[in-house]
Image (cartoon, helix red, strand yellow):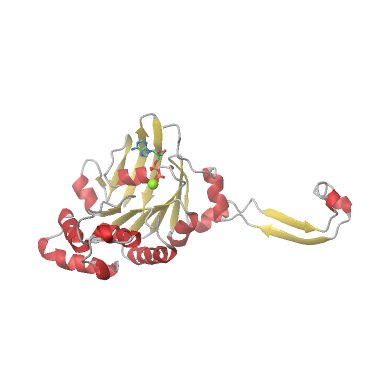
Amino acid sequence: MIEVRNLVKKYGNHLAVDHLNFTVQQGQIYGFLGPNGAGKSTTMNIMTGYLGATEGEVLINGHDILKEPEMAKRSIGYLPEIPPLYMDMTVMEYLWFSAELKKIKKDEIESAVEEIVSLVQLEEVQNRLIKNLSKGYKQRVGLAQAVLGFPEIIILDEPTVGLDPKQIIEIRELIRELAKKHTVILSSHILAEVSEVCDHIMIISHGKLVASDTPENLEKLMSGTETVIIEAEVEASRAEEIIQAFANANCPLLSIKRKKASLEEVFLELTGGEAEDDSDL
Ligand code: ADP
Ligand code: MG
C-alpha cells in the first residue's frame, strides 16, 4: 500500500530523516513512536506530499508521491500536526470547502459531509465558527477533514495532543472505528497511546527506524533481560555489602521477584530515553 524507500530529509546540515525504509499493509493501524524531534512529522509530511524529500521515494499504491501527486494523494487523508483550519468559517462551510478541494463530486458533497459530521460527532457544533470551538472540537474538525471522502489511508500526526482524557478516549475510539475500513498511520511521542491502539509500532529515533514490530513482539525483544528483585532482612550497616556477601550473610530472604522488561523500557532503551530536539539549530 505504502512503500517508503531510503527516505532522507536534510534541513541544512541537519539530518532529520535518516534513510528510512518501511512498508505499510492494508487494514492495520500503524504507530510512529518517537520522542519530540525524532522526525515523525517530517516523515509524514513527505509521505503526504507536503514536503519534498532530499533522497528516496514514497509510493502510494504504486504511485510516486512527487511524480504523480494527484493519483497518490487521492488515497490519502492527512491530519497534520497543526490542522489547516479556517477559523472564520463555520464547521459546515469548512467541510464543504474541504470537499471541493478534495474534488468530491458536487452531487456527492452533501451526503459525504453529513456522513462525516455524524461519524466524528460534530452535529452540535456544525453551525459554529471554528475559532469559537474548544481544542477537542477543533481537533475533531481536523480529523473530519482528513477522513472526508473516505480515503483508503488516513495519516494522523499526534491526533490526541493537547486533549483532555475524555477527548483522548473518544478520538481513540474513533480511530479504532476508522481502522475497520481504512489503513491508519498515527504518530505519538507517548508509548501508551500507540501500544493502546496500534497493531504495529515503528519506533523512530534521530530520524532512523530503530524497531518495527507488533507491541507484543517488542515486549519480547527485551525478555532476555529480566531484573530480579531480592528483598532481604538486613542490618543497615550491612546493606551495602549484602549483594556481594549474600550467600555468607545468613540473612533470611523475604521475597524474590522477577520483573519483566516493559514496553516502556524497550522504548527508552531504543531511543536513549530523552527528547531529541536539537538545540544547536
Ligand atoms: P517529530 O515530529 O518527531 O517531533 P520533526 O519531524 O518535527 O520531529 O523534526 C525532526 C527534526 O527536524 C527536529 O530536530 C526538528 O528540529 C528539525 N526540523 C523540523 N522541521 C524543520 C524545519 N522546517 N527547518 C529546520 N529544522 C526542522
Ligand atoms: Mg511532530
Q: Is residue 219 left or right of residue 207?
A: right
Q: Of 214 and 111, which appears nearest the observer?
A: 111
Q: Is residue 160 visible?
A: yes
- On the image, the x and y values in percent for residue 117 come to 24, 67
Q: Quadrant of residue 281?
A: top left
Tell me what residue is drawn at x 36 percent, y 46 percent: 41
Q: Is residue 8 left or right of residue 224?
A: left
- On the image, the x and y values in percent for residue 137 come to 31, 62
Tell me what residue is drawn at x 37 percent, y 56 percent: 159
Q: Of 206 and 152, which appears nearest the observer?
A: 206
Q: Is residue 152 visible?
A: no
Tell me what residue is drawn at x 45 percent, y 35 percent: 279
Residue 90 in the image: above or below residue 52: below
The quadrant of the rendered image in which ligand 1 is seen is top left
Disc tally is 0
- On the image, the x and y values in percent for residue 90 come to 20, 61
Q: Of 214 and 120, which appears nearest the observer?
A: 120
Outermost left residue: 107
Q: Quadrant of residue 94?
A: bottom left
- On the image, the x and y values in percent for residue 165 come to 44, 64
Outermost front residue: 132
